[in-house]
Amino acid sequence: MRIAVVDSGIGMLSTAAALFAARPDAELYLSMDPEHMPWGPRTHDEIVERALAGARAAVEAAGGDVDAVVVPCNTASVHGLTELRERFEPDVPVVGTVPAIKPAAAAGTPIAVWSTEATTRSEYQRRLVETFAQGVDVTPVACVGLAEAVESADPGRIAAAVAYAAERTPGRVRGIVLGCTHYDLVGGAIAEALRARPDAAGEVELFTAADAVAAQTLRRIGAVPGTGTDGGEAAGGGAGHGGGRVRVLASGRPARLPAAALTYPAGRALAAGERSPAR
């Protein structure tokens, strides 16, 4: 099973790690784009171009044959899914990412949506809230600099950016939608900052899309979590021990996982299955 995972940077790690945990026999082709990141400030056409280039590079690295293309990036999903599906489907399913507003709103209690400044202002997010959170108290929180801080893996920058967003999150909020996949990587720091708020009224649940995207990908390709491609149990129980492998591309060229990725548990899980760049 070969799966292409396309994003500008390490925001893909949580989804890729969820895929590898579910199917440790999978071959993952992680296509990052350090030369052109971040994608968020770019135009629609530029984002489409970069997402298509990343997907093509991953497919080529896989010998021209993948079972799915996964886009664990809200920005790339909003702008590029139509073009990606035109290019690859119906032969290869393309799975995008949507912030987990629907499950977060299900309880009817106040929630906040943490996302980038651009996404917070977007018509896209407003429509999601109107569709899935009608009648629910929703606070949009623009997390200034948090994605960039996570990408840098600088603890000081991460702490400052998380604190900034936590201060703007009302104490009544009982659920936080992590509307950028980078935020998944610092979920522990986010939960701690929320507990430390003077007006905090109790524990806050974090809602991410990584596991749902991984599960949807496996459904689309007819794969069963935890089993090998022949339907039997995969050898071993963790990433890198089920016969799978991880290959990394940096703006189309063979590479290794960036050092910043290894500071996060998801990155270290993927590193267990990483193979040396192809020569």
Image: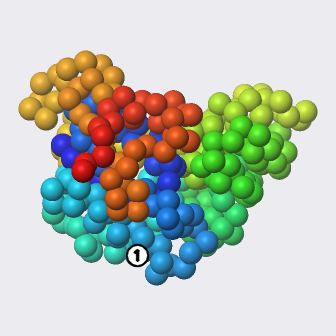
Q: In which quarter of the image is residue 134?
A: bottom right
Q: Which residue is drawn at 48% across and 78% down?
A: 46
Comparing 20 with 174, the one in front is 20
Residue 101 seen in the figure:
no
Coloration mode: rainbow
List x then y, in percent, for residue 213: 39, 47
Say which quadrant the N terminus sits in.
Answer: top left
Comparing 150 with 189, the one in front is 150
Q: Which residue lies furthest to the front in this view?
A: 279
Residue 4 seen in the figure:
yes
Task: Identify residue type, mark 1.
Answer: Glu
Left or right of residue 117: residue 195:
right
Residue 268 higher or lower than 65, as above or below: above
Q: Residue furthest right?
A: 198
Residue density around tag 1, few if under 14, some if 14–19, many if 20 or more, within 10 Å: some
Where disc 1 sits, the SS reads: helix
Q: Residue at x 46, y 81 (%)?
A: 45
Q: Residue at x 61, y 72 (%)?
A: 41
Residue 120 higher or lower than 182, as above or below: below
Q: Mark 1 points at which residue?
A: 49
List x then y, in percent, for residue 50: 42, 70
